[in-house]
Image (cartoon, rainbow, N blue to C red):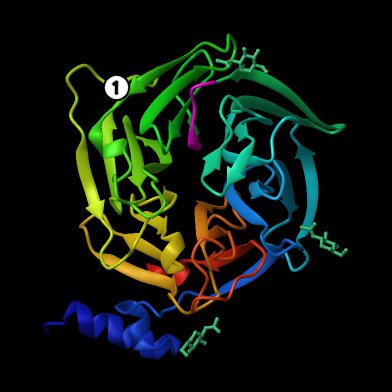
Amino acid sequence: MKVSWAGLVGALASALAIPMDRFHQTSLPLPSRIISQMNETGSFIENIAIRHSGALLVTTLHPSASVYTVERPYSNSPSTALVHTFDDANGLGGISETSRNVFIVAAARFQGLATTYPNTTSIWELELSGRGAAARRIVRIPEALLLNGLVSVPTTCKPAVLVVDSRLGVVFRVDVTTGRYEVVLDVAELKPVETGPLYLGANGLDIRNGFLYWSNSELVSIYRIGIDRAGYPLLGAEVEKVATIEGAGAVDDFTFDEQGNIWAATNLDNTVVVIETDGRQTVVLGSPTELTVAGDTSVEFGKTAADKHILYVTTSGAVAFPINGTIIEPGKIVAVDTRGFY
Ligand SMILES: *[C@@H]1O[C@H](CO)[C@@H](O)[C@H](O)[C@H]1NC(C)=O
Ligand SMILES: *[C@@H]1O[C@H](CO)[C@@H](O)[C@H](O)[C@H]1NC(C)=O
Ligand SMILES: *[C@@H]1O[C@H](CO)[C@@H](O)[C@H](O)[C@H]1NC(C)=O
């Protein structure tokens, strides 16, 4: 007897009373729920990092340079608390962990959502312990205009981060111990579009399998370049375009799932998009006219067994581009169950 694979799956599905479409069709949008929301309209959550305990750390770009934590984000009663507000700044960009419980953030004094005052940008270290949070300024970067995505170099023996400037269109490498910093990448694919509405180039950063990846908001694309273990671009390495997000007006931060698919926040389109390794793209959540992930800024998967299938999405509440022209809300954190995608 010849039994087809589809026949086998069908028999199994009916034996287990599972709807057949589970096996070949993603049910969209993916289920999601709000686990935390700021109290003030205009509160703009910019970036997210996840602690080994599973707690979330998020940064705010407005109204203050603050880090909040969400404990037990996957439980029925997640709790949000302020961790720290930085001095000499009113907004934060990216956040990344360099060693257990030590996080690096970019801070500045902003005069608009994407404009800082000259010579107000610093890189800070935030060390969390049972007794609270201790902040230390690592270095001022006077020439910075808009530090945004920040990623720690996972393979280096001396802790370092790469941080991208969305206006200058360059990647800085910062030695966290000495405070020494330098421009390590300066290419066209990092730059804003001269006529772009926000004048925002490279935005999110990530490192995976020996490549530095970045999104460029106004080019609506994701690029990569080979780097060495210390985080420097390889000699002679060329920039490759990984994907252009179809039908979107912008792309903000992104992350990878275990299979290597890219999950990206589109911000101005209020959607989360998956770019599979074969290039296929799917909007899995949100739409331009919905508040579900209004003005989504960054995404990260959970780190514990209980929530590694959960994608946490931070939002700005659509302040940069209000829904239907007028609707905004305070920034929030949305938990998305991604199991239905696979
Ligand atoms: C918002 O206000 C409520 C009630 O005062 C409080 O419980 C909650 O922690 C606040 N949220 C934030 C993000 O500060
Ligand atoms: C930047 O600000 C710092 C601290 O206020 C000051 O010491 C330094 O001279 C300034 N640098 C430039 C280039 O203006
Ligand atoms: C925006 O307008 C569309 C079309 O009228 C409507 O369906 C949608 O609910 C509106 N969005 C919000 C968040 O009110």
Q: Which residues are magenta?
A: 142-150
Residue type highlighted by circle 1: Pro
Q: Residue at x 53, y 68 (%)?
A: 293
> Helix or strand or loop: what does disc 1 sit on?
loop
Residue 303 is inside the magenta segment: no
- Quarter-wise, where is residue 26 in the image? bottom left
**Residue nearest the observer in this picture, 320 or 32:** 320
Cβ of disc 1 within 8 Å of ligand 2? no
- Quarter-wise, where is residue 76 in the image? bottom right
In this figure, which residue is indicated by the disc labeled 1?
A: 233
**Residue nearest the observer in this picture, 313 or 38:** 38
- In terms of image quarters, where does ligand 1 lie? bottom right
Q: x, y (%) of residue 138?
A: 63, 18
Q: x, y (%) of residue 330?
A: 67, 65
**Residue nearest the observer in this picture, 90 or 59:** 90
Q: From the viewer's perspective, is 108 left or right of 216?
A: right
